[in-house]
Amino acid sequence: MASKEQSPEERKYRQLAPMGLFIKRIILNFIIGLAIILLSLALGMAGYMYFEKMSIVDAYENAAMILSGMGPADTIKTTGGKIFAGTYALFSGVIFLAVIAILFAPIFHRFFHRFLIKDSK
């Protein structure tokens, strides 16, 4: 059952949303994904600066490498830093999957909505 907040284009078996609206949704989801990545990067940088006393540039490099799945660039020396790095790596894996889902959600939604329209005819 469709909620009252959905536009008429989004209800089951109705026509697809106009291409302009679809593009706006893709752009919005891209901005949301970028914001999540930047927030995650800032969190990682703060952790490396706090636990490992790294400079902002070294913290950026390590956080970016972990967030991208490459692994840390520097050797982690402290126990707190090692716990943080492991936790941040797990967090980064989840963030990667979440951002991919956010980016592709409008595309998959449109793809599956098209099948509902074809099935109703």
Image (tube, rainbow, N blue to C red):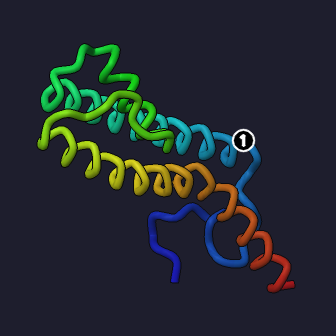
The x and y percentages for residue 104 are 63, 54
Answer left or right for 31 relative to 53: right
Residue 78 drawn above or below residue 52: below
Query: Where is residue 64 shown, x and y percent of the image?
Result: 43, 31
Which quarter of the rendering shows the C terminus?
Answer: bottom right
Q: Residue at x 71, y 56 (%)?
A: 17
- Height in image: 59 above or below 105? above
Q: Please tell me whether residue 103 is drawn above or below residue 34 in the rendered image.
A: below
Tell me: 91 left or right of 1.
left
* SS for callout 1: helix
Seen at 45% across and 33% down, the residue is: 65
Query: Where, by quadrant of the figure, is residue 53 drawn?
Result: top left
Residue closest to the eye, 33 or 66 = 66
Which of the pair 83/56 is nearer the observer? Answer: 83
Residue under label 1: 20
Q: Quadrant of residue 67?
A: top left
Q: Position of residue 21 (x, y in %)?
A: 66, 46
- Quick check: 100 left or right of 54? right
The residue lying at 43 percent from left, 54 percent from top is: 93
Q: Nearer the viewer, residue 108 or 97?
A: 97
Residue drawn at (35%, 28%) of the image: 74
Count of number-bearing discs? 1
How many other residues sit within 10 Å of disc 1, few (<14), some (14-19) or many (≥20)? Answer: few
Q: Amino acid at mark 1?
A: Gly
